[in-house]
Amino acid sequence: MQANDRVLVAIMNNQADWAIARDQHWYRIPVTSVKQSMQRNWPPAWIAFYHTKVFGGEAYRVQYYAPVLRTPVVSRSQLFPAEPVNAKTQKTYYQVLMGPLRRLPAPILSRRWRRINFIPTIGEKFMQAMEINDLYHESPLEDRLWVALKRRQIQAERQEFVTIHKRKYALDFAIYCQLGKIDVETDGDTWHANPQQAEKDRLRDNALTTEGWRILRFGSQQVWEQAGEYCVKTIAKNIEQLGGVQTPQQKRTGEG
């Protein structure tokens, strides 16, 4: 795997699909999913799998990956010719044909047992990642702040999705505290100078605030030049005011 190779971390949430990936060496992704969220990163050179809770002791981690050979577009009826005709029969998928599965020396863990769908990343990040949040490759600005947060050992979830009144919002960083929740946003100054985007941000911030989120926004210059001395210090002060970070164990048991 090369440093700049495209890698797609995909969800694996049932044993039947895992058997297909393991034994028949293919995985399916709806064409609509690629067009909506992954088109600029398509096709990947490698695919890896994030196992959900149905995998017991190997859940909430990335441990297996494989080289991608081809990605033809096929219908569901071609993938499952024995399946009775139904509403999904003509649905189209990318059939990700891959080589034999390989196992990472150490798994990439999700400390908070989070839900994900797909994470496009690159080879360098994939091979060096220790946890799921190390994989994200959306923005150099986010990467800069993530390194500063890790240096202070502040646990945050990157690209967390929150649904409020049937609307889904993407949070750059979500920090779950004992007495509340913090949404940290890294605002690219050019993007957020757009009046229409500013209006969307106001509506978004109002919705999140109403649901109990404390929102912190940092501009490009602040992140690039003052990530540690200003951004992280401000985040740490807010965490202290909210009783400290909730541990993954407390999240799972409902404590705190």
Image (cartoon, grey):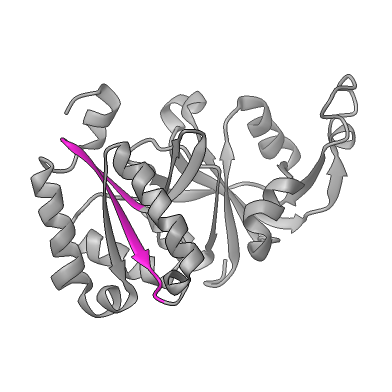
Q: Nearer the viewer, residue 172 or 85?
A: 172
Which quadrant is home to the N terminus? bottom right
Quarter of the image where one finds residue 209: top left
158 inside magenta stretch: no
In the image, which residues are magenta? 173-189
Residue 104 pos. (x, y %): 48, 50
The extreme top residue here reads: 84
**Is 188 within the magenta?**
yes
Q: Residue at x 9, y 46 (%)?
A: 241
Magenta residues, dominant SS class: strand
Above-or-below relation of 102 to 165: below
Query: What x and y, as percent, mark residue 43?
Result: 70, 61
Image spot of residue 93 (x, y percent):
79, 44
- Would residue 75 appear left or right of 35 to someone viewing this image? right
Q: Say which residue appears at 66% left-offset and 52% top-offset.
A: 36
Nearest the eye: 211 or 18: 211
